[in-house]
């Protein structure tokens, strides 16, 4: 019985754990990390402890640091069966980082992204 009560308290605490990026939306440009490459625009949406990008299924994200030294990571399922490992850093209203796209055969492509909080004048 004590274990059940402890599990319920832990679940409630996790639900109300402060998530510093929740409620933020970011406009970013994503570019493959090679010499010649085109960039594309993406929107990152942080809500409910999850991050969504490009219409893929949202996934939980984790953070470390605080204030202007905030780092975050998330692993999202891709549209074509790949896995997208996002790692980023937030400084004020700016965001930047890398995305590692791993396909079903294990091939990895590296991308860089950078952008700003949506709705904040640049």
Image (cartoon, rainbow, N blue to C red):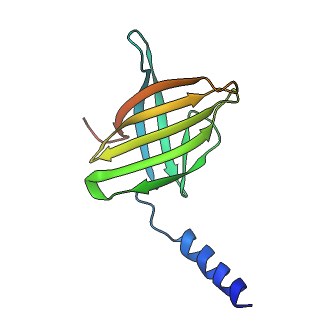
Between 5 and 92, the residue placed more toward the observer is 5
Asked if residue 68 is positioned above or below residue 26 in the image, the reply reads below
Between 23 and 53, the residue placed more toward the observer is 53
Q: Residue at x 49, y 54 (%)?
A: 62
Asked if residue 87 is positioned above or below residue 32 in the image, the reply reads below
Q: Residue furthest bottom?
A: 1
Q: Where is residue 20 in the image (x, y as percent from the top left)?
A: 40, 59
Q: How many marks?
A: 0
Q: Where is residue 58, by image quadrant?
A: top right
Asked if residue 45 is positioned above or below residue 43 in the image, the reply reads below
Q: In which quarter of the image is the N terminus?
A: bottom right
Q: Which residue is drawn at 35% across and 34% down?
A: 115
Q: Position of residue 86 (x, y in %)?
A: 49, 39
- Relative to 52, 32 lies left or right: left
Q: Is residue 21 in view from this perspective?
A: no
Q: Residue furthest front?
A: 106
- Relative to 5, 85 lies left or right: left
Q: Residue furthest top?
A: 36
Q: Where is residue 74 in the image (x, y as percent from the top left)?
A: 53, 45
Q: Which residue lies furthest to the right in this view?
A: 1
Between 68 and 87, the residue placed more toward the observer is 87
Q: Is residue 44 in view from this perspective?
A: yes
Q: Quadrant of the C terminus?
A: top left
Q: Position of residue 80 (x, y in %)?
A: 69, 26
């Amino acid at each position: 019985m004590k274990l059940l009560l402890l599990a319920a308290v832990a679940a409630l605490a996790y639900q109300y754990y402060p998530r510093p990026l929740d409620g933020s939306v970011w406009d970013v440009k994503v570019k493959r990390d090679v010499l010649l490459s085109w960039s594309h625009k993406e929107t990152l949406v942080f809500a409910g402890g999850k991050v969504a990008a490009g219409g893929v299924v949202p996934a939980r994200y984790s953070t470390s640091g605080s204030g202007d030294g905030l780092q975050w990571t998330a692993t999202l399922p891709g549209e074509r069966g790949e896995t997208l490992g996002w790692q980023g850093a937030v400084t004020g209203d700016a965001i930047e980082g890398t995305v590692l796209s791993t396909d079903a055969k294990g091939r990895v492509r590296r991308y860089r992204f950078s952008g700003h909080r949506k709705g904040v004048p640049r």
